[in-house]
Amino acid sequence: MSKKQDDPPPIEPIAMTIDGVVTYLFPGMSVRTWRRWLSSGRCPRGFKIGGHGRQFWRVAELRAWAEAGFPDRKTFEPMWREEMPKKRAEPRP
């Protein structure tokens, strides 16, 4: 099936759950490994919505983390705080 020229671009999620993170960034990695990275400070912290404790990660933050070479959280968080205002100012497609 060919894509028509006037088809809209696919919608990209703003945030994703742990299952999406391991599928998106690290295909083949287990959720358990990601949780170990999370508890050891090797990956971004993410955020929680609601009282159920479900954790999410911003796609833009994960991209910035990957582009920076996957630094540990202590190194990455100051970089992200500096980059975040620029990301918010970019126009969305």
Image (spheres, grey):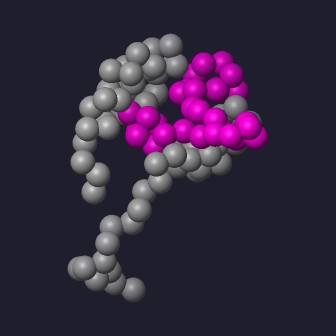
Please, which residue is most extreme toward the top here? 74
Please, which residue is most extreme toward the front here? 50
Q: Where 18 sits versus 40, above or below?
A: below
Near-viewer residue (46 or 62): 46
Q: Where 43 sits versus 78, above or below?
A: below
Residue 87 visible (yes or no): yes
Near-viewer residue (69 or 21): 21
Q: Position of residue 33 (x, y in %)?
A: 69, 34
* Residue 88 appears left or right of 22: left
Magenta residues, start to end: 36-64
Q: Where 5 sits versus 70, above or below?
A: below
Residue at the image position 46 percent from the left and 43 percent from the top: 59
Q: Indicate whether residue 69 is drawn in magenta.
A: no
Quadrant containing the N terminus is bottom left
Residue at the image position 44 percent from the left and 20 percent from the top: 76
Near-viewer residue (54 or 23): 54
Quadrant containing the C terminus is bottom left
Quadrant position of residue 29: top right
Mark count: 0
Q: Position of residue 57 (x, y in %)?
A: 54, 39
Quadrant position of residue 5: bottom left
Q: Position of residue 54 (x, y in %)?
A: 70, 41
Residue at the image position 25 percent from the left and 42 percent from the top: 90
Q: Indicate whether residue 42 is drawn in magenta.
A: yes
* Residue 84 appears left or right of 6: right
